[in-house]
Image (cartoon, grey):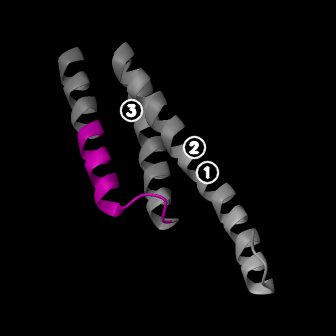
Amino acid sequence: MANHVSSLKRARQTETRTAVNRVNRTRVRSSLRSLREALAKGDVKAAQEQFRVTVSALDKSVQKGVLHSNTVSRYKSRLNARLKALATAKA
């Protein structure tokens, strides 16, 4: 355990940041899961709406430093490709 005043403060700050990061990471993962489920069901309308919500959550995660920008770009690209394939298959 920390013994110095500064290290005690850093321990408190770490706990706070960990809680914030956990909330942000959970929001992103839940959104991704919802989108993937909508894609699996084949519901184009719900998938398109969830895609907008998911992209917003992913972009916010980049701003907050939870995910790297290249990782988010890869996620968005792959999800958009799946959404487009579903939409064209239904049409």
Image coordinates of residue 63 in percent, x first then y, are 48, 66
Disc 1 residue type?
A: Arg
Taking 71 as reference, is 11 above or below it? Answer: below
Real-space Cα separation, disc 1 to disc 2, in angstroms? 6 Å
Real-space Cα separation, disc 1 to disc 3, in angstroms? 26 Å
Residue placed most toward the observer, 76 or 23: 23
Specify the segment rendered in magenta. Answer: 65-79
- First in sequence: mark 1 or mark 3? 1
Disc 2 residue type?
A: Thr
- Please identify the dominant SS of the magenta region: helix
Q: Which residue is mark 3?
A: 48
Q: Are the residues flagged by discs 1 and 2 in contact, CB closer than 8 Å? A: yes
**Helix, strand or loop for disc 1:** helix
Taking 68 as reference, is 10 above or below it? Answer: below
Does the magenta portion include 68?
yes
Is residue 6 found left or right of 17 in the rendered image? right
Q: Are the residues flagged by discs 1 and 3 in contact, CB closer than 8 Å? A: no
Image coordinates of residue 23 in percent, x first then y, are 63, 50
**Helix, strand or loop for disc 2:** helix
Residue placed most toward the observer, 46 or 16: 16
Which residue is found at the position 75% from the left and 85% from the top? 6
Real-space Cα separation, disc 2 to disc 3, in angstroms? 21 Å
- Screen quadrant of the C terminus: top left
Q: Which residue is mark 2?
A: 26
Q: Identify the disc placed on residue 22.
A: 1
**Helix, strand or loop for disc 3:** helix
